[in-house]
Image: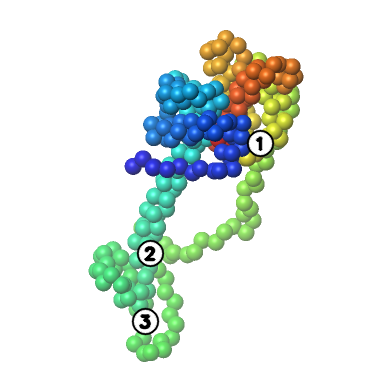
């Protein structure tokens, strides 16, 4: 069943659309809803929805896929999160049911006779409980304690004992993000075939943002750089020119040129977040 709704974060949306007009925001929301329903949208669909509303700022919020369709990176991440949550809940339900079923073989006599469902238990469970019952049980109201060893037939009669954590066991350390040096970015650019100017633009852009993607700290800069290259290659092949400008070139560009650079940079930011499994801006 297709999910009828998606999580909408008001603060993120306002921050990502602060320069849009009311009409452009309305168009953006319509485009997001259409993408959620169809999986992607066409440029023609966006222009048909727009009517007389300018589409430049709204179109910049969508990436062009290999199939030529437009997709918003943040919305696709919300779709993935819903799918992951449903799979996790399904797995937890199955595991819980299996645990309850298997725990019936270890039930005590009082638990066995107090089954609220009044259902007859399977032979395997009944035999396991019969074998677990002590031979020297006393009918007196206060029998002497008798030690009982329960064997698991699936393990060849090996006594079941609670597993204890290792004394010296420590949790795995959390790997912290370390921002790259210019030399590391240069080497990675040479490795993946990205021009040095793009590597410098990547480094300066994320340095200015504090290595934050949306509102989440970056986890893997090589993956983000690879996605930056993928976006660069697609845009360069489509337009015959680099997709980004260095910060100094952007400052010296005219207003239209700077806005184009900002749209390209935002799109690269969203693509990096999608590749790094992070939250992209709306």
Q: How far apart, in angstroms, are the residues tagged by discs 3 and 1?
A: 68 Å
Pointer 2: what residue?
103
Residue at the extreme top:
240
The tag earlier along the polypeptide, 2 or 1, is: 2
The residue tagged with tag 2: helix, strand or loop? helix
Q: Nearer the viewer, residue 7 or 161?
A: 7
Residue 178 on image: x %, y %: 70, 36
> Which quadrant holds residue 49?
top left
Is residue 279 placed above or below 240 in the rendered structure?
below
Residue 66 visible in the snapshot: yes
Q: Is residue 27 left or right of residue 96?
A: right
The tag earlier along the polypeptide, 2 or 3, is: 2
Query: In the image, what residue occupies the spot 35% across and 66% down?
Result: 104
Pointer 1: what residue?
212
Residue 11 on image: x %, y %: 59, 43
Residue 36 on image: x %, y %: 42, 35
The tag earlier along the polypeptide, 3 or 1, is: 3
Pointer 3: what residue?
136
**Contact, CB < 8 Å: mark 2 with mark 1?**
no
Q: How far apart, in angstroms, are the residues tagged by discs 2 and 1?
A: 47 Å
Query: In the image, what residue occupies the spot 56% across and 25% down?
Result: 57
Q: Nearer the viewer, mark 3 or mark 1?
A: 1
Label number found at residue 45: none
> Which quadrant holds residue 212?
top right
Is residue 145 placed above or below 59 in the rendered structure?
below
């Amino acid at each position: 069943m297709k999910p009828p709704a998606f999580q909408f974060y008001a603060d993120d949306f306002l921050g990502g659309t602060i320069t849009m007009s009311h009409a452009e925001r309305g168009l953006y929301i319509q485009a997001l809803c259409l993408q959620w329903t169809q999986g992607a949208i066409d440029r023609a669909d966006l222009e048909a929805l727009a009517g007389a509303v300018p589409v430049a700022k709204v179109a910049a919020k969508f990436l062009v896929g290999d199939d030529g369709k437009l997709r918003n990176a943040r919305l696709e991440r919300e779709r993935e999160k819903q799918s992951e949550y449903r799979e996790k809940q399904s797995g937890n339900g199955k595991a819980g049911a299996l645990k309850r079923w298997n725990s019936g073989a270890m039930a005590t006599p009082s638990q066995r006779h107090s089954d609220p469902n009044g259902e007859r238990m399977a032979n395997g469970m009944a035999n396991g409980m019969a074998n677990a019952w002590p031979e020297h049980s006393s009918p007196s109201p206060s029998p002497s304690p008798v030690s009982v060893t329960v064997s698991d037939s699936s393990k060849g009669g090996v006594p079941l004992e609670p597993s204890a954590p290792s004394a010296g066991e420590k949790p795995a350390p959390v790997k912290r993000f370390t921002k790259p040096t210019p030399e590391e970015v240069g080497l990675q650019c040479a490795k993946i075939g990205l021009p040095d100017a793009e590597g410098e633009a990547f480094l300066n852009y994320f340095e200015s943002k504090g290595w934050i993607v949306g509102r989440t700290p970056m986890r893997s800069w090589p993956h983000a750089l690879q996605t930056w290259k993928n976006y660069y290659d697609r845009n360069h092949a489509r337009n015959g020119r680099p997709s980004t400008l260095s910060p100094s070139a952007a400052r010296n560009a005219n207003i239209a040129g700077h806005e184009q650079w900002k749209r390209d940079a935002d799109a690269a930011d969203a693509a990096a977040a999608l590749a790094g499994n992070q939250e992209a801006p709306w």
